[in-house]
Image (tube, grey):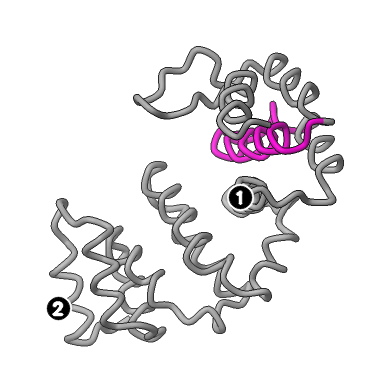
Amino acid sequence: MELSSKAKNIISQVSDKTTKLGDLRNIAKEIKIDHELAMQLWSSKHFFARQLAILIMDKKLLTEEVIDKLVADIDQHDENEKLQLIDWLMANQLTKDKKTVALIEGWGDSPSPLKRRVYWYYQGRLRWVGKIQPNSEELLSVIERQIENEEPYVQWAMNFTAGWIGIYEKKYRNRCIVLGEKTGLYKGKKVSKGCTPDYLPEFIAIESYKRNL
């Protein structure tokens, strides 16, 4: 794709390794929505340019075909960048429109691990803010059956969902704790100061206590 002078100028602004998310947000605030520019930035394959592109995309133009192309491109990045981009796309675009939320809800058994991560991370984020959902029993059954055979970055999102189910829905709490003990995922893994361990028995105990649940 041929880049406009505006796209080239922006890419030069964000190409430094010291670029921060705040810098990208400030640029996006000035641009607002410009899908054509977003696609030009995206075509550069540059990590920060793609993060900025996500912020200025027009969500009305994000069909599943377009999303599939974005996901395929994201999959070409190294794992750290890959996860930042897919989670950024989910948080800033895919969860902002009923149409794309409906797409997410169909990705639980997608052949794309990145789309499955979005599905599970979205389910967890719904519960993170205390929204009890009617499909917790169904999700737990799937998690129990599949989590040990999933890609690590999908496992994390499934574990995240199980954790918040266990925190807010007491009838499932012990079941979620047992799941964590059985899989042993993240047991003993060091976390940064002030962060909660991802190991389900610890995660549920700490976060439940914080909320007096």
Residue 139: x and y, percent? 79, 42
Most prominent secondary structure in the magenta stretch? helix
162 within the magenta span: yes
Measure the C-alpha gap from mark 1 to mark 2. Answer: 39 Å
Residue, disc 1: 129
Label 1's element? loop
Reply above or below: 203 against 99.
above
Residue at x 19%, y 85% (from the top left corner): 6
Give yes or no for contact between labels 1 and 2 (Cβ–Cβ under 8 Å). Answer: no
Callout 2, which amino acid?
A: Asn
Residue range in magenta is: 146-170
- Whether residue 187 sits left or right of residue 46 in the image: it is right
125 within the magenta span: no
Residue at x 56%, y 71% (from the top left corner): 96
Label 2's element? helix
- Whether residue 55 sits left or right of residue 7 in the image: it is right
Callout 1, which amino acid?
A: Val
Reply above or below: 59 against 164.
below
Earlier-in-chain disc, 1 versus 2: 2
Q: Residue 200 is drawn in which quadrant?
A: top right
Residue 24: x and y, percent? 26, 66
Tally of numbered tags: 2
Badge 1 density bin: few <14, some 14–19, many ≥20, Cα 10 Å:
few
Residue 69: x and y, percent? 52, 68
